[in-house]
Image (cartoon, coloured by chain):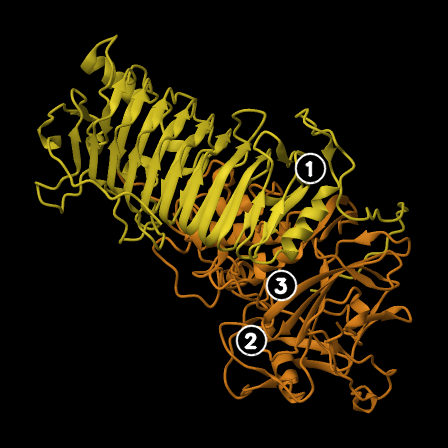
Chain colours: A orange, B yellow
Amino acid sequence: MNQKWVLLIGVFLAVAACSPAKQSVSVFLEENPANLSNWGVVVAKSGSLALGQDVVPYDLNTPLFTDAAHKLRTLYVPPGTSATYRTGQALDFPVGSVLSKTFYYPKDDTGQLLSTQYTGDDFAGEGLNLAKVRLMETRILVHREAGWVALPYIWNEAQTDAVLERTGGVQSLNLQLPDGGEQSFAYVIPNANQCAGCHAVNATTKQIAPIGPAPRHLNKTYPYANGEKNQLVHLASLEVLAGFNPAEKHPRNANWRDEAALLEDRAAAYLDINCGHCHNPQGAADTSALYLDLPGDDYTGGNSGLCKPPVAAGQGTGGHKFDIVPGQAEASILWYRMDSTNPAVMMPELGRSTIDHEGVALIANWINAMQGHCKIEG
Amino acid sequence: MKLHRIFISLALPAVLLASCGESADNSSAKSDIGQVNNEYQKQLQLQLLDAKPSDVITIPAGVFSFDRSLSLTVDGVTIRGAGHDKTILSFKNQIAGAEGLLVTANDFTIEHLAIEDTIGDALKVNEGNNIVIRGVRTEWTNGPDKDNGAYGIYPVQTTNVLVEDCIAIGASDAGIYIGQSRNIIMRRNRAEYNVAGLEVENSINADVYENVATNNTGGILVFNLPNLEQRGYQTRVHHNQVFENNLKNFAHKGAIVASVPAGTGIIISANDQVEIFENTIKNNKTSNVVVSSYFSIGSMTEAGIKESFDPYPEDIYIHDNVFEGGGNSPDMLEMKALRIAMFGLKGRLPDILWDGFANPELPADTKRICVQNGTAEVINVDGPNGNKSPNMDQSAYDCTLPPLPEVTF
């Protein structure tokens, strides 16, 4: 059974003339290779995590919080093909495309892992310096004939390769916080089904799909090796993206940390990427009738969360009656569930063991700025 | 807004990298059946990942410990244990995951095993057709506690769902909760020490029979909640034993079931076409049957409830039940005062309590509640006017409704 498609890329196509030859990408359309290095998408060698041939890094205006891990995201489409632009959802990637997301933490000289803000410059120069980071896991999304498949790879202690662990894993971590304090927690790597918990954004079709590489998330600059550039423009110039008209106005989510942006735009962007993959009218959390995705309809009358009673929150209410009580973040279920690490309470349900205090503060500020109150009838 | 990396030479041992998941702690050995098995977690999850349609995954007798949720996404799979008292999946050591087992698949059967002590829900099935849950026990072994998981058996957005011969104990919300589903049979189950024993919510065409609901806060609930795509109607509740559901409500405030008074046998909220017949309903201290609008939940807001939501119950038909005792010690202050004022120190509230909210836009002869149940009476507690003028006029309830069809699929 050796039905893999190996797409060999000639080294002469290398874009960066001065860099060593990049590894070619192998796209496995049938089997699940045991090692991440088999893919050639991101490869640890010579003290750095390097990208494979034709692999393009990207990041998002506002990312999902995952225990303060930094993430190196990459996309790859088979040479001669391209993803097609579409609004409202991820780009339409052709079969054979491979996305990767590597979770890592910065570390100091002693090996102590650090909780720091991701600023986008970790990857300037297109090579993660393994002396300064600890790689945790790399998740692969591969577009096969029958649809997307998600595969979790866990990095070995020697940081030489990552091994497929479809049942996920747990690792004890200790992070040093920016204020000098420490945080110990169980870093949980989802199993392959749990990948679908977020990536099956339509819970009826249950089809896995990418979430991040949608125009509203990608529409930002990225510090490429040869300079900063808008990601959509860059992808189009590489002919990796088709159907993109740079002259048109494209959706753009706010950067949730951009204090110059409107508070409501920052909050909406945060909720979109952290919650909207389930909390949308077709998502797994449509059972709650709370919709937090963008660009959504203008959710009102119960779906926005404003003065909305819960459906099946259980102990997730925290004693509160409504998802959002204007002006009162701490009386709001939305705030309460973000500010918890109890698996029965916390939202999102997966992907974190710690609280995103900065995100909680953002949502609290947003709720506290709302006018009005929830008047109970009857 | 760049934050430079901080390099502080705080010496610490190398990062702990436990190889993968399995907890070495086997302190969860509550049951004396076999050895607690911590190694099985990975094997079972792999089986669930690799399952093919029509596979039967057999779990032997024993106590198996899990520290994370299990999940299944493959259609057509059966999970089978050796009995709800023999095959025990213990989540006492759970550190992650909002449920014990999450199933997002069609044609799913799970039978003859127990799921104990999950942090959140025990068994959740989210969207699926042809779901069979048989002989499954979900239990929080520490007894009723507000920090227990919310739901024991929780199929939501399912079609053709059969829950039979199950046992649900200790859920901080509902023991068996079928939500937003269509074509439901819930039979021969036992629900005990939950806030809500058995609950049907926003569902269409449900048949709830031959169950035992006792020692819950509320025995059997038929609810409609606002804002959801599907409004529920057409539920039969019959041949159940619903007695002594007098447990103090231990739900977290704000949860919908936190509004259920302790001592409620069967409660209908904002649902329509509910037929309650030939049950034995005894010694539920607030009332054997409560018919309620959504207003009485206490969460009706203009901003947060879609206008299309109908908060009123209609077409409720209560007939041929055996009532005994109950109503003698209602949970709410207003009802305590009302009982004494109307029925004396030793009196009891009637078997059927209606909150009195009626849709003013419907014609006067609308059949809201019809009762053909011997001497059983209805009290309208006049909720809209703060219980000022409760009344015992029975004339409005002397009507009948066509019987609802049996559910088959």
Residue displayed at 83% across by 88% down: A11
For the image, the number of numbered tags is 3
Q: Where does label 1 land, which residue? A: B65
Q: Nearer the viewer, residue B17 or A119?
A: B17
Residue B304 vs residue A239, the one in the foreground: A239
Residue B365 in view here: yes
Rendered view: A43 above or below B382: below
Task: Give residue A285's position: percent from left, percent from top.
Answer: 48, 54
Q: Residues within 10 Å of mark 2 (few under 14, many from 20)?
A: many
Name the kind of residue labelled 3 in the image.
Answer: Pro
Identified at 35% across, 55% down, the residue is B229
Residue identified by numbered label 2:
A215
Q: Pick out the residue farthest to the top.
A: B346
Mark 3 to mark 1 CA distance (whole Å): 34 Å
Q: Kindly state the secondary structure of the residue where label 1 is placed.
A: strand
Q: Is residue A144 above or below residue B95?
A: below
Per the model, the C-alpha gap separating discs 3 and 2 is: 13 Å
Q: Which residue is mark 3?
A: A63
Query: Tag 3: Cα neighbours inside 10 Å, few (<14), some, or many (≥20)?
Result: some
The chain containing the residue under callout 1 comes to B
Judge if badges 3 and 2 mark residues of a common chain: yes
Please report, as a chain letter, where disc 3 is located: A
Amino acid bearing label 2: Pro
Element under disc 2: helix
